[in-house]
Image: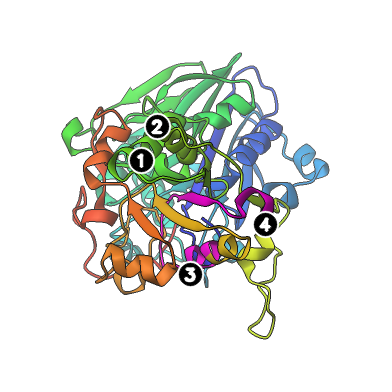
Amino acid sequence: MLSEDRIGEECGVFGMYDLDGGDVARSIYYGLESLQHRGQESCGIAVSDTKGPKGKVFSHKDMGLVNEVFTGEDIEKLAGNIGVGHVRYSTAGSSVRENAQPLVLNYVKGTLALAHNGNLTNAPELRQELAYTGAIFQTTIDSELIAYLIARQRLKTGSVEEAVALAMPQIKGAYSLVIMSPRKLIGARDPHGFRPLVLGKRDNAYIFASETCALDTIDAEYIRDVEPGEIVTITADGQILSNKTRCIPEKEHGHCIFEYIYFARPDSVLDGQSVYDARIKAGRFLYKDDPIDADIVAGVPESGNVAALGYSMESGIPYGQVFVKNSYIGRTFIKPGQKNRESSVKVKLNALNHAVNGKRVVIIDDSIVRGTTSDRIIRMLRDAGAKEVHMRISSPPFLWPCFFGTDIPAREQLIAYNKSIEDIRKIIGADTLGYLGLNRLKELVDNKMSICEGCFTGKYPEEPPTDDIRGEFEA
């Protein structure tokens, strides 16, 4: 999915603790680069030396992509054997440096650096409560509330991991956290497990990351996933401590199914399920449930490619490339004004005339949000000479917003709201249109986990907020 019609995942987190004392900033940098797909607005790294002065933290963060924000000199200055990193996606209006993470907090017990993936649903209540007890906020993100709550609980407890355990019942919604204290690295996940978090190891260093692809990038070995509701602590003497007091029964979990459809990289394995395999299945199901005769099947780069391959495998229709993608359009890309004829989609994608001219094309995308991108994609294929264009979507129609870390807009902005599939087909100009069936979602993950499908059904694993506050408080 491309352009203004895409949806965004709030962010990616990465933390590393080298018990042998080696610097971790360079590895965190490469880990964040591999998680860049989870957020392109801002990024940052905070590190500390566990053998140096207690509570001394070096950090660097700014707006932009990882390779834009950090130079070799910046990395050299981040000397320390424990650290956390973050890449962030945000909606319009809150894309400012102050909201970049990790957050670094200095308080009575020392320092705390925190990176958060997700969205809290009780952020306004927490913010008001903390403000009335003297808290002064530096950001407009809900991650700062989590940091404050942990710091306050730490004043009453003997360890930072206990403080995290006491803070967790106070926060609602989605959160995968990586927290650095002066001598410990902690990974924690909300009880429903909305967002992923994995634990890995390289030599005598431990790593927390949003996805396994980040472990692969730095040649680390995957150990296991942090369980929903679990707090995992890496101590200075190499212990891995696990606190499962906040864990709930598996049937109450709510793993975000869109991680498997779109967000995660295809080479990642989350909660025991290969993302690549899930997308291949989605493509196969699309053909099984709504077959069509065609000459070529292709994906909208990059998120539709694997599902398109699955569709080809099931149908026998040749898999091909029908678009060339300009991979060098970064955050500095300026959308053309209304007077310009160029569309932001066409600057990023161009149809391959020789691949589609005179052919019946099946094009696979991960979703349709407002419909503007789908309309332009289909028009491009027709302009390139496609005889027929059949669109297939590897998710069900979006009918409800998400409050748990996915930037799906209010219902009124969703093209599927109050419209039939036939209505949508006419709007985007496809010859036929088919979506993945709701009944297929659990099959994508082999029925082995409880998933959140709230954006398709309006039924969420936990009660959503009565007001949509996502624009005010974000991860």
Residue holding disc 4: 64
User: Disc 1 versus disc 2: distance between alpha carbons?
Assistant: 7 Å
Labels 1 and 4: the sequence-earlier one:
4
At 37% from the left edge and 24% from the top edge, which residue is drawn?
272
- Asked if residue 28 lies left or right of residue 370, the reply is right
Q: Which mark is residue 372?
A: 3
Residue holding disc 2: 314
- Residue 361 image point, x, y percent: 51, 51
Residue 329 picture quarter = bottom right
User: Disc 3 versus disc 4: distance between alpha carbons?
Assistant: 26 Å
Q: Which of label 1 and label 4 is nearer to you?
A: 1
Instruction: Name the kind of residue labelled 3 in the image.
Output: Thr
User: Disc 3 versus disc 1: distance between alpha carbons?
Assistant: 24 Å
Q: Is residue 318 above or below residue 448?
A: below
Q: Is residue 4 above or below residue 290?
A: below
Q: Quick one: 345 or 221, which is closer to the camera?
A: 345
- Residue 70 image point, x, y percent: 74, 47
Q: Is residue 439 above or below residue 227?
A: below
Q: Quick one: 258 or 120, which is closer to the camera?
A: 258
- Asked if residue 205 lies left or right of residue 284, the reply is right
Instruction: Name the kind of residue labelled 2 in the image.
Output: Glu
